[in-house]
Image (cartoon, rainbow, N blue to C red):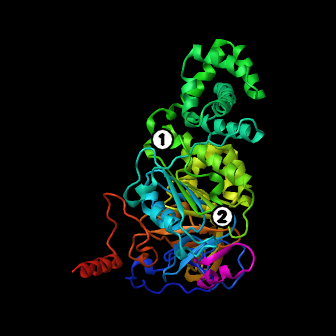
Amino acid sequence: MAWWTGKRGSAAPAAPAVADTRPRHERDATEGFPRGLPDGDRHKPSALGRWPSADEMAEFQSRPDGPKFGEWKPGMFLVGRDHKGRYYGHDDDRHVLTVAGSRAGKGVSLIVPNLLFWPGSALVIDPKGELATLTASRRSAGGSDWSVPLTPGEGEVYALDPFSRVTGDARQHAFAGFNPLADLDPATGEGADLAYQLADALIIQSDGDGAHWTQAARALLTVLVMWVAATEPPASKNLVTVRRIVTKGEAALNALWVAMAEHGIDLIGRTGEAMQGTQAKELNSIISTIATQTAFLEGEQMARVLSASSFRLEDLKAKRITVYLCLPATRLATHGRWLRMFVTLAMDAMERTGPLRDGQHRVLFCLDEFAALGTMETVEKAAGQIASFGVKLWPIIQDLTQLKRDYKDGWETFMGNAGLLTFFGNTDLTTTDHIAARLGETEVVRIVESANETWQDAVGGSRGDPMMALVGGQSNNTESTNQSKGGGQSKGEQIQRVPLMHASEIVQAFSRERGNILVMIPDKPPCALHRCVHHSEEDDGLFGGLFGTIEGQKPPRTKRAEREERESVGKRA
């Protein structure tokens, strides 16, 4: 009879524990976890999955070399808070990957808190415009509050907001634009490479029979970008003009091929000649592919953000610049190519500007809804190299299925190059099974007690020969009964290897409602913390007064906000 499982050296519970009435944020995030808690093992386990003790948490940041994880300080990536109100952060030169389920709270508990304090430049994909609304004013303020190793001064904020989703005070920053053709010189090898990167980002690769047409479309679009950059005046030197050329019709395109064939730039000239000799059916298919995949460029919204540049991507390291790419969730499928293009060009600029110089801080690429970008070979390849150029990639996805779908055999590249993995609000089996495998196994002692009893009844006898009585002899009859009882008891311990957490336990322990975050760092035990919430009472001491207000939404009233309101009313009186 198995009656208790626990750690070797631990006593079996004698009675139910008294209910803990403390608020959840004042309790250890590992409270109630089934296994692997630091409770004094007497033997050296062969399965090493476990949760760290409080002393280990305090010692994480004491190593002079390698990544730092421990008490949060400005400049670190803010991860979460323990039950005693201490904030924890992570600081190294590798990337971050967040896997958080839909509506799990990744914005309020990770993205907004880090944008409020990240000391370097940031490129932010902002699907709703809410990140800019909440953090733009703070990030434009600069000054001593940042504790930054950069030249003090005001930060520059640019919100590219074609569909006008940014509200509040941040709206003043929402009229920015970026024209990727503005500084493109098609006569140089660098310019031609930049044109190809643009085409690669805008034309999404098809599989099977469609692969030929997308590859041909990329090649032609590359040259069309170079043509516009070489021949158009500054006012029309943009992607909208490229789109108009493609949709002008057969006669206009035939005239274009003739003009291109006479151009002095070799690639443009050769392409013009080749197009004149291409069969009409094939050429029409190539043009159709370009027209279809650049359809998002139609309309004045995109024309406004692509007509002129408010900043240079090359300045992201030299200055404190924040760029918000605001695109409604309903437009991600149709206009996601714009985001792909911007991320591609930004990474290229970071590589061209070389490693960080003294006094510069890493540039954070906050890629919310990363899956909306689709497969990006440039990002996959850059994941292992771009960190050396001062970039911290932060892809944020809803589940690992998205990563596996887009990157096939290369999906673990993102995890392998991350110095910090964070998980919460996960409910799908692909993600929770992966987490369970990463957590590893721990050892539990299974105490087995058995008891048995035996009973035995024996009856025997003998009967004499009746003929003996007839001849004068004796006839004896005998009968005997025997009873015996026995049994025993045994008790032993069995050490078993079991998962530190099963998938179902992970779903419960790190659910949206419970408010915990799972933090995984190479060479360190996994740890569980409470998630910060920028507008919560518990975190008001850190975030209060730093974030903006979303139009039409009122965050919960905190004691600080009520006190400041009373003081404001008193001054007016």
**Residue 314: x, y in percent?**
66, 54
Q: Place residue 498 in its image quadrant.
A: bottom right
Q: Is residue 244 above or below residue 406?
A: above
Q: Is residue 339 above or below residue 427?
A: above
Magenta span covers which residues? 53-73
**Residue 534: x, y in percent?**
44, 69
Task: Single out the residue that lies furthest toward the front.
Answer: 233
- The answer to whether 45 appears left or right of 325 in the picture is right
- The answer to whether 69 appears left or right of 155 in the picture is right
Secondary structure of residue under mark 2: loop
Query: Marks 2 and 1, how far apart in space?
Result: 30 Å
Give the amino acid type for the residue marked by disc 1 in the picture.
Answer: Arg
Give the amino acid type for the residue marked by disc 2 in the picture.
Answer: Arg
User: Can you identify the residue that label 2 sits on?
Assistant: 362
**Residue 279: x, y in percent?**
68, 12
Task: Single out the residue that lies furthest toward the left.
Answer: 573
**Residue 219: x, y in percent?**
70, 29
The residue at 57%/82% (across/down) is 484
Q: Is residue 405 magenta?
A: no
Secondary structure of residue under mark 1: helix
Residue 449 at least partly seen: no
